[in-house]
Every structure is written in structure tokens, then in C-alpha cells.
Image (cartoon, coloured by chain):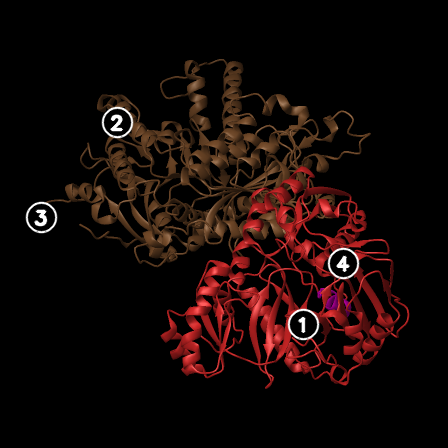
Chain colours: A brown, B red
């Protein structure tokens, strides 16, 4: 079958969700989204207006102003790692966004990864986890072969914390290894140097293919502060490593420009010289279309109580073009939904957890909870994941998963082995994969559905994501197992001891609840970004367009030769 | 901005460029031939590198040595001035390759404008009127005759790679044209290694009017009005003035706008001059584009108050043009006289030698006088180079007052030891033909002998 048989999915919201419930869920979500917006604004403000003024007084733009001027007018940059180091203190200092802005940014119609030192935070210096944040962005660009633009304005390592950012495997020097790997893979890198660019900072731009330097910029292995006699000779860092030296003498940079605006305009011109996006070709003449059911409604779809369920199909309906979707193996492994939809006109594979209860295929007439991985579901997802990889279809994993089925029967069926097959598949896939933690991301389910340890290109969390090995209550039960009876009730009779165990379990549960806060994950880089549900569709458009942008580095089969069709054919009931 | 600028030229233009460089806190670094070592004008430089022997071929045309001089003196930019290597795209490319910013247009545009036929085709496509002629090169004499029948006689054959009149033939009828073709082609082949010819309607006389443009690398171009350069001897300009007495304000802004648009369209960057021929009927035709600073640029600087060399350096440092067309105004009238060490009484024979006295008064007339020179009393006028000893630029509110200012300056000049062309200038300036503004390139107004 050469046609990709997409069909309408989803219903108008009124058809499955009453207004009162919707409003209630929406209100709960709004609260979280407002918190998200205010925290984003805090990061964007850097160290505040004093430092912004200082940058302006110096005749320069801030990192975010540079990004704004670099991007295509009207386009939205997609920032990753916004909350790295969130809530973390270094002495009495904070490092909003770890002092660097990393964002998928559309420039001249091409998606690029922009890495911009935040010059309003300690002169753009590198904090603990700043190198890791930069490397993560480089990794995303490398995997998708997206051009990288470095907007450098960096005074080097934040020295008081050097032990956390200098020596390790992902220490600052690893950024330059990533520069080299990008170069080796043929990914274009363009750097604009706007100010300080000291020590390690000096290496970041110069591996780039094109280096622009403003009249205020300098690149040095060591600044004037470390040069003996610099003071008596009136040598400034600008004299040692400004454009006069690097553009004209050393050849370490290519173009001198008067100011930030000119540098950004010329970097845009460079991007325009790169190949245009392959997305238009891979759309196969389809026009991008918004979902028929508005994606904005996603914010009110998830119940305020995380133990309540919702129809997962309705989530999908609000993410794919025209709300058209082709579900594959719809009759088997019902706890999972796998299939194909278009996003921005481009084919994308989806894996999602059905919620609520499903028929138990092994026990006629019986029901069992979905949101868990059973044997058939695992097999279905593994086969789908392999087929997408074979066909070059990017996969979006939408996680709301409590974990694997457990118990005597599950072990007898060999779920460990089925799970391993899926793990192997996801680990060796080369097609771009993206993971979204819609809500629960628990235990081996998080791993099996391409959670961050399986290196999806990007992992997003919603404000209601719950990432942990297990829910707090379950973890408390496991931890206090020896104190509990068969029904997980406290075994002790002594009231004092009971109270102690009770308090211990409660404390454990609360600690896990804190761990599951998405800002904690984001701060630790256990997830790449926190996004509002209404923003998910935009991110998926980015994922699709970025996956199909660069031609020639990965397999992309046309639908006529998809192996997915073979699987679908074999699963059709005989008539 | 650049910190050190190599001025790859000599004499008057080197001094002119050094003046602006210094005003911009850019250190001017000079080059000199052995013949020029010790010359007064080298005092304008912070350092000088000797690049070879007296003959330009051994010094001022030694591209590789000049780039080496720039590199070893730590220059980040190079200004070629005019003449020598100023319009050599290979030299521009060599500079860029060695990290030295060439103050001039990209090699590509220089190359395009350096070839007559491609330049004409490009400028026609960019909206400028061109002299009726063969769009492409001519295959043979038959093609030339066919084309001439189309555009009408008289016609002129020109060499594609030409210059200096070689390979050129004026023809008034088909048989003459057919016969001239082979000879012109052979002459061009011998002179330029390229025997390709094209053909144009021959326009007798006419006026030489050129438009000064400035373009940045971001696609913005402005014009600084025109210069009238019709007073020439053997294709050498003698007197230039701006505004041209021939153009109405409407024609002025029309041709200026067209020139700026054309420059932007061909991707021109830097200062440049688009030369036009104005025929007797008042129609303007594109002739060629000079991709460099012009000798007569001070005329434009006088009426606009814009330092063209400064703009060149800023454009070379990738700055955007700060000039806005609507705010560029022409104030008053300016005239430039080129004073050469030639003797008008002896058929303009070169007159090198030692200058005993060198005085040109600048405070006599109603207007202001600017003198661009590299010489003073006691200096030698070298036989190896251009015979220009000074340019005198008079600026006043009206043309009459500008002429009067110039007359006072030149009449009061005392230059002894060498002969100069000042007597010629004086005769022109007082002639009724010049004063009326009705003159063209066919003869020098007020000068009875030695017409072009």
C-alpha cells in the first residue's frame, strides 16, 4: 500500500469532556503555566536591568537581543535548557540559564542552533553545567545536522567554581571536542565574536567555519590581566587579540564588522548561503495544516489529579495536521497507540500511552489498566520503532507511563526480554527521536519509551510531568517493605512505632514528590525544557522540520517503500 | 576601524589618503620606489617600505612586494589610490587572501567593470542607457556591417579589452568598416592579447559627465552628484567642475538616482564613478565605470562636504553607509584645475626638474581654495611618474565666483624651475566659451592650439 491511510481522529472537546471539568483542569494548568512564564521571564532577565544597562552602555546588545535580531522576523526561537541551574546557588550568586542561551532558531528559513553567552550574567562566563548545556545544544545540532551559530561574549570560566566546570569528562574543553565533531560531520558552524572571548572561550569560535568579529571583540588565550608588563605598555586585551590582529594578521577570524547589528546581519547572509531546507521536498506536495481540533485545548485535557485519566487519542488529535492519523495495529497491545501523522506536512511516527482501562487479551471479558507496558504493547512498540527507523520516519514518544507490568504472570511471559528488545531497538535507532513527558514517566517505562538515558535528540516535560523511578507512595512501600504486611499496611502494633513508620513513609513520599518537580529535572539537565501543553504543537513542528531539513546524512524512504506498510498488511484481519 | 593602513601609491594621492587616515586615527604606512626615497611627501607616513626601483614596473606595480609590505608592517587595510594597481582585480584578491582589506570593490565587480562589453551589458541590465551598438562581440566583418546598418553611421569599432585608442576605428560607410575590421582586430590582438571587437554609434564631441557614487556592502548606494570633465587634452582631464553647467536640476537628480541604483544592482561596494557621454541632444549614455577614487574627487568633496576617502575606509571596514540621499546637498560650485609639469608653449612637452619656487595663494578670491599637492620648493619633479604637480580646487557660492577665485589663485601662483600648465588654465578660465558653460570634449575652450 503506497498510500498512507490517515483518517480523522478526535472529537470536539464537548463530546468527551464536560465544560466544568475542562474549566477545572484548565484552571489548575493555568496556575502552573503562569509559574512557568514567570520563571522564564526571570531567566530572561539575567542578573537584571543594571547588567543590561551595562551591556548597552558598552555599545553592545544582550544575548537575547542578538537572538531576536538574528532570527527570522515573526518566528519563535525554541529555547532548550532554560532552567539549567534553576534554584542553585554559588555562594550568594545565581546563574540564570547557566549564563548561556541555547535555542533552535529559524534563520533565513533554516533551523539553526544558536548558542549565545548571556552577557548579563557574570559577563557571559561559564558556570558549573554551562559547558554541559552548550554541549547538549551542540549534540542536538550534530544529530540533526543543523547549522550552529555561536554568539560569543564570554569572559571564560567562572573561576571560583572551576573545579565543577573545568576538569571532568564534560568539562569546558569538551565543548571544543564537540566543535570538532560537528566540523568532522560537515555541520556548518558560524561564530560571531561580540566582546570578551578569553581562554577556553577563544577556542569555541575559531573551529567555526566563518568567524565574525566586532570592533569590541577580542579572542585571547590569556587576557591582558595575565600578561606581564601589560600595564606599563598600556596593552589592552583588545590590542592583544582584537579584529586588527585576528582578522588581518593571525587569520583566526575572517571578517571584521563595526558592531553587533552588522555582525548579525552578515551571519544571516552566511546562513542564506547554506542549502535550503529539505522539508518542502519531503512534504510530498502536502501543505502544512494546523490540527483540526485546537492544540490550545491540550492545557485543559489533563485532569488536575494525576491519578485520573483522559483519552490519549484526543491528545494526538490536537498535535497532528488536520487531526488526521493512521493508527497501526489498533487491535493489538491496546495499552499503546502507535501510528503516523503529519506535522507541518511531514510524516512523524507517534508512540503514546492509552489511558483508562482496556480489555485484557489473556483473560476473556476481563479488564486491566492501561498506562502500563504489557507484552503485546511492548512488542508492538518495538516493531513500530524498528520500522520507523528503517523508513527514516522521526519518532515522537508521548510518555504517560507508570511502568512495566509486574508479577508472576509478567515474568513468566518474559517481559524482561521483550523490554530488552525494545531497549535494544531504541538504543540503536538512528532516525531522529524526540520524547515528551506528558505526565508520568516512571520506572522502566521511562526507559522503554526513549527517556533521556536513551538519548532522544530532545526531551520535553510539561509542567505536570512526574519523572521518577516510581511514584512516592510506591517508593515508600518499597523502602519500608519489611515493616509492612501483605496488604502494604504497617505491621507493628505499638502506636509509637506505627507513628514513626508512618512519619518515615510520609517523609519519603514527600521527598520523591519534590524530586518529581519538573524544575528539578530541568535544573539537573534530566530533561531539556519545560513547555506548556499549548506549546507542544509548535515544538513538534520544529522537530519535524528540523528532522527533514538536512538532506543526505540519513535514510529517508518515500512512503511507497516503507516497511511500515508490510507490518500493517500482516496485521490486517483476513476478510 | 583599521589601525594601520598601507597606502599603495605615491605622491599627491598618497598624501591625500594619509590626511584622512590620520584624522581617523589610522596610521598611514607608505611605500616608495628607490627614486622616491627621501621625498617630502613621505613625511605624511608613519613608516615607509621601499618596494623597488624607480620604474613603476619595479615598484608601484609589484603586487606581491606591496602585499608583503602591508603584512610586515602590520597593516590591516590597503588603499590603492588611483592608477597603478587600483583597478587590478587580481591584486585585490591577493590582498584579501593575505588578510589585508582592500579599500575598493570586490574583485568580481572590478573584473566585470574592467571589460567593456560585459560592463555595458551589466549596466544596460541595471537600467542605464548605453550608446546604440552591438550588444555582444562581433564575430566578423560581415556581422559588423550588418550591425552598422541597423544603428546607422558613423560608427566606431572598439577593442573589448581596449584602452588608449588602440584597436579603435571610426567608419562612415560599409566598405570602410569591412576593411577596418581586420586591421583593428589585429591591432587589438597585438596590444591586449585579445582581438575581439564591438561596435557603437560614433558620437562626435559631446560632454563627459560622471556621477560619483558610494555603496556599502549591504546593498545601499547613494550618489554625490556629477562632475563635468569635458575639458580634456588627449583624453586627459584638465579642468573638472561640479555641478555641470549642462544639466538641469531634474536631469541631475535623474542621472544621479539611476547611477546609484545601477551600482547597487551590480553589487558594487565602495566609492566609484560612472562616466556618461552626453550627446548634442542632451541624451546621456553610459561609457564606463571607474572602480576607484578619482583624481577629481575633491570637486565633489567641496560641494558636498563629504570626505570620500573616509567613506571608503568605513565601507571597507564593513560599516553601513550613514549617508542618506535626501540629506546630501550640493552647496555652491567647485572647479578643479590640474597643474601638470608640462610646457604648453612647447606642445605640452614634459618639464621635469627642480622646483625653485612653489607658491599658490589661497586667500585672494571670494571663495575658498584647496590645494592638493605633494611638492614644495626644492623638490624634484621626477621623470618616472605622472607629471601632476598640484590640483587647485576653488569653491564658491556661484560658478562665476568659483571661476574668479580660481583665476585669482592661478594668476597669483609662482612656480619656478619647471614649466606648468597654468597658462593654459588661465586662458580657458577667461574664455567666453568656458564662462558660458557651453563647451564639449571636441576642443579646449579658449585654447587655440593643441585641441584634443
Q: Which residue is mark 1?
A: B233
Q: Which mark is residue A418?
A: 2
Give the structural element (helix, strand or loop) at label 3. Answer: loop
Q: Which chain's residue wears label 4?
A: B
Q: Which residue is mark 4?
A: B352
Number of other residues with Cα within 10 Å of mark 1, as a class: few under 14, some 14 to 19, many 20 or more: some
Residue B427 percent across, percent down from the top left: 79, 78
Q: Is residue A367 above or below residue B56?
A: above
Mark 3 or mark 2, earlier in chain: 2
Q: CA distance from mark 2 to mark 1?
A: 96 Å
Q: Are marks 1 and 4 on the same chain?
A: yes
Number of other residues with Cα within 10 Å of mark 4, as a class: few under 14, some 14 to 19, many 20 or more: many
Q: Residue furthest front?
A: B346
Number of marks: 4
Q: Is residue B302 magenta?
A: yes
**In terms of depth relative to the viewer, which is nearer, B262 or A446?**
B262
Say which of marks 1 and 4 sits in front: 4
Residue B287 percent across, percent down from the top left: 56, 71
Residue lying at 54% horizontally and 74% vertically, measured from the top left: B128
Q: Which residue is mark 3?
A: A575
Residue lying at 60% horizontally and 29% vertically, measured from the top left: A200
Q: CA distance from mark 4 to mark 2?
A: 99 Å
**In terms of depth relative to the viewer, which is nearer, B241 or A342?**
B241
Q: Are marks 2 and 1 on the same chain?
A: no
In contact (CB < 8 Å): disc 4 and disc 3:
no
Residue B324 percent across, percent down from the top left: 68, 66
Amino acid at each position: 500500500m503506497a498510500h498512507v491511510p490517515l483518517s480523522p481522529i478526535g472529537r470536539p472537546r464537548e463530546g468527551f469532556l464536560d465544560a466544568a471539568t475542562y474549566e477545572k483542569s484548565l484552571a489548575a494548568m493555568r496556575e502552573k503555566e503562569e509559574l512557568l512564564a514567570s520563571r522564564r521571564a526571570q531567566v530572561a532577565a539575567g542578573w537584571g536591568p543594571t547588567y543590561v544597562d551595562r551591556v548597552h552602555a558598552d555599545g553592545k546588545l544582550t544575548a537575547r537581543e542578538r537572538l531576536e535580531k538574528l532570527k527570522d522576523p515573526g518566528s519563535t526561537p525554541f529555547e532548550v535548557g532554560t532552567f539549567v541551574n534553576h534554584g542553585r546557588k554559588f555562594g550568594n550568586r545565581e546563574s540564570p540559564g547557566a549564563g548561556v542561551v541555547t535555542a533552535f532558531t529559524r534563520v533565513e528559513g533554516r533551523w539553526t542552533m544558536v548558542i549565545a553567552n548571556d552577557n548579563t550574567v557574570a559577563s557571559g562566563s561559564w558556570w558549573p553545567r554551562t559547558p554541559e548545556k552548550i554541549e547538549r545544544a551542540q549534540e542536538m545540532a550534530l544529530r540533526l545536522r543543523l547549522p550552529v551559530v555561536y554568539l560569543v561574549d564570554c569572559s571564560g570560566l567562572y573561576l571560583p567554581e572551576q573545579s565543577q566546570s573545568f576538569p571532568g569528562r564534560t568539562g569546558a574543553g569538551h565543548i571544543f571536542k564537540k566543535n570538532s565533531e560537528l566540523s568532522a560531520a560537515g555541520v556548518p558552524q558560524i561564530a560571531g565574536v561580540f566582546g570578551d572571548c578569553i581562554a577556553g572561550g577563544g577556542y569555541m569560535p575559531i573551529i567555526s567555519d566563518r568567524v565574525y568579529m566586532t570592533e569590541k571583540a577580542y579572542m585571547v588565550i590569556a587576557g591582558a590581566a595575565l600578561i606581564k608588563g601589560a600595564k606599563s605598555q598600556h596593552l589592552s586585551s583588545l590590542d592583544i587579540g582584537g579584529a586588527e590582529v585576528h582578522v588581518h594578521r593571525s587569520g583566526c577570524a575572517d571578517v571584521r564588522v563595526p558592531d553587533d547589528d552588522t555582525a548579525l546581519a552578515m551571519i544571516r547572509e552566511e546562513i542564506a548561503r547554506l542549502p535550503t531546507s529539505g522539508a518542502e521536498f519531503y512534504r510530498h506536495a502536502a501543505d502544512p495544516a494546523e490540527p483540526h481540533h485546537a492544540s490550545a485545548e491540550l492545557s485543559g485535557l489533563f485532569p488536575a489529579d494525576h491519578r485520573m485519566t483522559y483519552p490519549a487519542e484526543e491528545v494526538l488529535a490536537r498535535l497532528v495536521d488536520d487531526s488526521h492519523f493512521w493508527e497501526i495495529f489498533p487491535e493489538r497491545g491496546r495499552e499503546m497507540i502507535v501510528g503516523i501523522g503529519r506535522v507541518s506536512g511531514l510524516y512523524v511516527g507517534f508512540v503514546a500511552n492509552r489511558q483508562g482501562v482496556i480489555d485484557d487479551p489473556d483473560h476473556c471479558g476481563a479488564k486491566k489498566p492501561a498506562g502500563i507496558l504489557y507484552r503485546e504493547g511492548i512488542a508492538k512498540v518495538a516493531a513500530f520503532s524498528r520500522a520507523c527507523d528503517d523508513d527514516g520516519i522521526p519518532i515522537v514518544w508521548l510518555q504517560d507511563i507508570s511502568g512495566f507490568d509486574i508479577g508472576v504472570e509478567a515474568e513468566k511471559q518474559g517481559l524482561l526480554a521483550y523490554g530488552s528488545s525494545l531497549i535494544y531497538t531504541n538504543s540503536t535507532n538512528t532516525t531522529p527521536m524526540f520524547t515528551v513527558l506528558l505526565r508520568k514517566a516512571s520506572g522502566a517505562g521511562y526507559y522503554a519509551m526513549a527517556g533521556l538515558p536513551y538519548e532522544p535528540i530532545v526531551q520535553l516535560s510539561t509542567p505536570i510531568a512526574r519523572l521518577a523511578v516510581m511514584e512516592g507512595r510506591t517508593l515508600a512501600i518499597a523502602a519500608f517493605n519489611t515493616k509492612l504486611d501483605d496488604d502494604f499496611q504497617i505491621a507493628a502494633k505499638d502506636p509509637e512505632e506505627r507513628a514513626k513508620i508512618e512519619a518515615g513513609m510520609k517523609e519519603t513520599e514527600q521527598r520523591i514528590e519534590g524530586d518529581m518537580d519538573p524544575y528539578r529535572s530541568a535544573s539537573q539537565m534530566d530533561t531539556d525544557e519545560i513547555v506548556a501543553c499549548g506549546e507542544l504543537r509548535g515544538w513538534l513542528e520544529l522537530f519535524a522540520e528540523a528532522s527533514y531539513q538536512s538532506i543526505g546524512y540519513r535514510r529517508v524512504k518515500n512512503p511507497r517503500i516503507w516497511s511500515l506498510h508490510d507490518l500493517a498488511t500482516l496485521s490486517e484481519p483476513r476478510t | 576601524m583599521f589601525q594601520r593602513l598601507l597606502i599603495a601609491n605615491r605622491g599627491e594621492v598618497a598624501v591625500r589618503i594619509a590626511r584622512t587616515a590620520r584624522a581617523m586615527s589610522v596610521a598611514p604606512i607608505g611605500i616608495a620606489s628607490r627614486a622616491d626615497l627621501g621625498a617630502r611627501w613621505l613625511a605624511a607616513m608613519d613608516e615607509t617600505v621601499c618596494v623597488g626601483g624607480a620604474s613603476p614596473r619595479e615598484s608601484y606595480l609589484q603586487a606581491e612586494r606591496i602585499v608583503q609590505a602591508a603584512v610586515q608592517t602590520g597593516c590591516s587595510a590597503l588603499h590603492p589610490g588611483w592608477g597603478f594597481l587600483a583597478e587590478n582585480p587580481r591584486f585585490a584578491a591577493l590582498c584579501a587572501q593575505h588578510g589585508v582589506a582592500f579599500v575598493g570593490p570586490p574583485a568580481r565587480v572590478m573584473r566585470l567593470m574592467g571589460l567593456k562589453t560585459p560592463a555595458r551589458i551589466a549596466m544596460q541590465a541595471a537600467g542605464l542607457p548605453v550608446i546604440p551598438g552591438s550588444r555582444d562581440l562581433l564575430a566578423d566583418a560581415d556581422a559588423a556591417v550588418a550591425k552598422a546598418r541597423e544603428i546607422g553611421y558613423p560608427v566606431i569599432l572598439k577593442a573589448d579589452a581596449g584602452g588608449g585608442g588602440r584597436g579603435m576605428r571610426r567608419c562612415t560607410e560599409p566598405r570602410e568598416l569591412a576593411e577596418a575590421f581586420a586591421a583593428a582586430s589585429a591591432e587589438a590582438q597585438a596590444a591586449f592579447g585579445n582581438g575581439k571587437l564591438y561596435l557603437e554609434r560614433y558620437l562626435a564631441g559631446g560632454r563627459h559627465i560622471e556621477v560619483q557614487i558610494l555603496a556599502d556592502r549591504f546593498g545601499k548606494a547613494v550618489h554625490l552628484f556629477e562632475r563635468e570633465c569635458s575639458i580634456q587634452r588627449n583624453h586627459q582631464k584638465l579642468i573638472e567642475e561640479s555641478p555641470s553647467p549642462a544639466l538641469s536640476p531634474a536631469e541631475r537628480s535623474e542621472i544621479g538616482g539611476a547611477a546609484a541604483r545601477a551600482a547597487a544592482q551590480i553589487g558594487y561596494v565602495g566609492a566609484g564613478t560612472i562616466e556618461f557621454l552626453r550627446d548634442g541632444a542632451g541624451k546621456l549614455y553610459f561609457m564606463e565605470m571607474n572602480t576607484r577614487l578619482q583624481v577629481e574627487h575633491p570637486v565633489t568633496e567641496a560641494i558636498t562636504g563629504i570626505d570620500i576617502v573616509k567613506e571608503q575606509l568605513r565601507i571597507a571596514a564593513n560599516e553601513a553607509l550613514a549617508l542618506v540621499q535626501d540629506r546630501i546637498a550640493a552647496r555652491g560650485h567647485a572647479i578643479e584645475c590640474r597643474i601638470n609639469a608640462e610646457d604648453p608653449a612647447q606642445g605640452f612637452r614634459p618639464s621635469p626638474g627642480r622646483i625653485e619656487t612653489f607658491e599658490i595663494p589661497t586667500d585672494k578670491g571670494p571663495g575658498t581654495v584647496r590645494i592638493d599637492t605633494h611638492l614644495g620648493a626644492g623638490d624634484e619633479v621626477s621623470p618616472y611618474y605622472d607629471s601632476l604637480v598640484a590640483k587647485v580646487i576653488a569653491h564658491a557660492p556661484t560658478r562665476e565666483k568659483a571661476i574668479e577665485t580660481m583665476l585669482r589663485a592661478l594668476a597669483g601662483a609662482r612656480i619656478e624651475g619647471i614649466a606648468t600648465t597654468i597658462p593654459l588654465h588661465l586662458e580657458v578660465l577667461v574664455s567666453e566659451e568656458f564662462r558660458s558653460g557651453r563647451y564639449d570634449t571636441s576642443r579646449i575652450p579658449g585654447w587655440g592650439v593643441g585641441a584634443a
